[in-house]
Image (tube, rainbow, N blue to C red):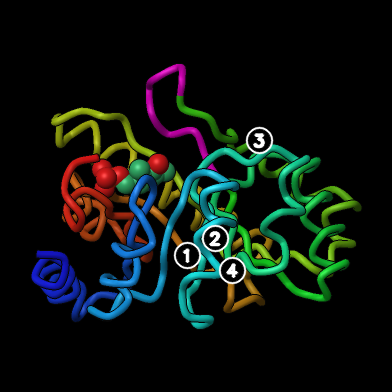
Amino acid sequence: MIKENLDRIQQELTGTNARLVAVTKTHPVEVLQAAYDAGARIFGENRVQEMAAKQPALPADVEWHLIGHLQTNKVKYIAPFVHTIQSIDSLKLLLEIEKQAAKADRVIEGLLQFQIADEETKTGLSLPEAEEILRSAEFQALRHVRLTGVMGVATNTPDQDQLRREFRQLRGYFDKLKSLYFAEEPTFREVSMGMSSDYGLALREGSTLIRVGSAIFGSR
Ligand SMILES: *Cc1c(COP(=O)(O)O)cnc(C)c1O
């Protein structure tokens, strides 16, 4: 089933600019290997320890994306291998990523996570908070973190109009930041939005990274 599901989703991505992040949280390494064998190369995990435990068991060309909240004291466990941290929500976290990436002699990519859902529990930055970070001298001095775009988790709702509004809001944040702070940087290009239940809509609203778990691997 994993292969059929991956093939179906890849089919839906042809003709778009978007790529698939296969969200493998809670699944054992055998399942990740099956997804790899079926062509998946970008894996999303939401917990540091779980990702660090799985990484050595998978081929080296996997792109590991952290998609869950990251505490600064845990950056060191993933800095040697993580490709993209999608959940950057503070300058403090950026500075710690810089420090650990420098130690590992690497550049780590990152997305600024925005609060777009109407649920109190969902974390993320507001636009003014993000702009304050981007304007700071500390941010401009970073050499081992490269911001490549934005990420958001929409409200868990079947309401298509609400989801469309939230995706458009995130896309709007991306466009604004791109024109004001990253106009000369082609690597700032990612809008990570859309999950199993809403990735079709997210693609129509300009997603470049869909994060899909249960539609590939079944319910957790
Ligand atoms: C779990 C998770 C997903 C994938 O959710 P599915 O509904 O299983 O596709 C996407 N993004 C984040 C941030 C997640 O935590």
Q: Which residue is mark 4?
A: 83
- The quadrant where ligand 1 appears is top left
Whichever of callouts 3 and 4 sits on the residue coming sooner in the sequence is 4
Q: Quadrant of residue 163?
A: top left
Hey, what amino acid is under mark 2?
Gly
| 204 vs 199, nearest the viewer | 199
Q: Secondary structure at mark 3?
A: helix
Instruction: Pick the quarter of the image with the N terminus.
Output: bottom left
Tell whether circle 3 marks a residue whose Cβ is less than 8 angstroms from ligand 1. Answer: no
The residue range painted magenta reads 113-121
Residue at 25%, 75% (x, y): give it: 16
Report x, y in % for residue 14: 19, 80
Q: Quadrant of residue 30?
A: bottom left
Position of 200 with respect to 114 (left or right) is left
Counting from the top left corner in percent of width and height, residue 113 is at 54, 44
- SS at mark 4 in the image: loop
CA neighbours of label 4 inside 10 A, class few (<14), some (14 to 19), many (20+): many
Q: Which residue is mark 1?
A: 190
Q: Among all residues in the image, which is located at the extreme top?
A: 120
Residue underneath mark 2: 149
From the top left corner, tell me how far across and down residue 76 is, in percent: 77, 53
Disc 2 crowd rating (10 Å Cα; few below 14, some 14-19, many 20+) is many
Query: Is residue 73 covered in magenta?
Result: no
The kind of secondary structure element at disc 1 is strand
- Mark with earlier residue (2, 1): 2
